[in-house]
Image (tube, rainbow, N blue to C red):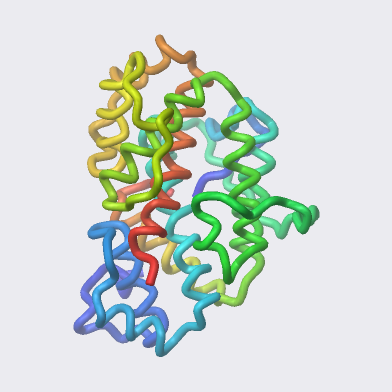
Amino acid sequence: MELIDGNWEDSLLSEDLLAALKFTDHFILTPGPVPDEIKSSLLSTFTQKEIAELSIGVALFHGFSKMLIALGREPEEMDTTVVPTPQFPDSTVSNADLSGTFSHLFTDIPDIGMRWRILEDALFSIGDVPDRALSLVKHRMSELLGVSYLATEQETSVMENSELLQSVTESFVFDIRSISSVTRREISEIYGSEGLLQLMFAMALYDGILRMEATKF
Amino acid sequence: MILMSSNYKSGLAWPNEEIGLQFRDLYGAFWCGGSLAHELKEAVRVRNARITDCGY
């Protein structure tokens, strides 16, 4: 366990593990263009498909860890922690639509990309938080992570609670511990407790995908 | 990490069943499919938990 604590210079880890962990650090701590040294380590060890898998993996781990912190649901705060063993899904998604803003990130891993897209659609269909609010979050997050994409008018227009949504988005990206019980209460009063979950889930999903975009090479 | 358990007592449950199912589908496809070694996925998961200071 101590081998992955970050003291890379003296590390005895294998080349592939070191490359993956350095990429993980970059993805989380300094999301942006990947430095040449990390890029060449990755390319000498992994295929493009494996790099895409690594990237979506860190995106899921990081985004949803922060979602749980933002919701105040870390293990020590819960009576029981149930962590089911992941299973390969039974269902196939061969007919799902992979088009959309982020489709190019999944060129090498279409099976995962289609599932990501289905999850995003399901998230928008809940309806506790207005689509405009979710779009605003996505847009603000893309600005914070230095990712430019063609924003729709809906994503940039001023709306009720814009200030709060933008402030929480900034906290989610850069200072997750600053999302407190007071913040959670404020959001719940506007969107309800399920709306709070929907909003944080959206933030986890977009934080991950936009970091993938920011670090893609 | 996480997961959208159907058990509300876990504190991890998601009230919208569809979202829970779709999340498990995506996470399961990443975790159980693909060509990256499980050891590597687990190392990356733990590294994220260390940096993020997340109890998972």
User: How many circles with numbers are drawn on the protein?
Assistant: 0
| Horizontal arrangement in the rendering, residue B50 relative to residue A63 (left or right) | left
Q: Residue at x 39, y 40 (%)?
A: A151
**Place of residue A167 in the rendered image (x, y in percent of width and height, measured from the top left):** 25, 28
Q: Quadrant of residue A74?
A: top left
Residue extending farthest top = A189
Residue A211, compared with residue A16, is above or below; it is above
Residue A70, compared with residue A36, is above or below; it is above
| Horizontal arrangement in the rendering, residue A200 relative to residue A23 (left or right) | right
Q: Residue at x 38, y 33 (%)?
A: A137
Q: Residue at x 51, y 28 (%)?
A: A198
Q: Quadrant of residue A122?
A: top right
Residue A162, compared with residue A135, is above or below; it is above
Q: Quadrant of residue A29?
A: bottom left
**Place of residue A168 in the rendered image (x, y in percent of width and height, measured from the top left):** 30, 29
Q: Residue at x 47, y 83 (%)?
A: A46
Who is closer to the viewer here, A169 or A175?
Answer: A169
**Place of residue A215 in the rendered image (x, y in percent of width and height, measured from the top left):** 34, 64
Who is closer to the viewer here, A169 or A216?
Answer: A216
Residue A104, compared with residue A96, is above or below; it is below
Who is closer to the viewer here, A61 or A130?
Answer: A130
**Place of residue A83 in the rendered image (x, y in percent of width and height, measured from the top left):** 58, 47
| Horizontal arrangement in the rendering, residue B23 relative to residue A163 (left or right) | right
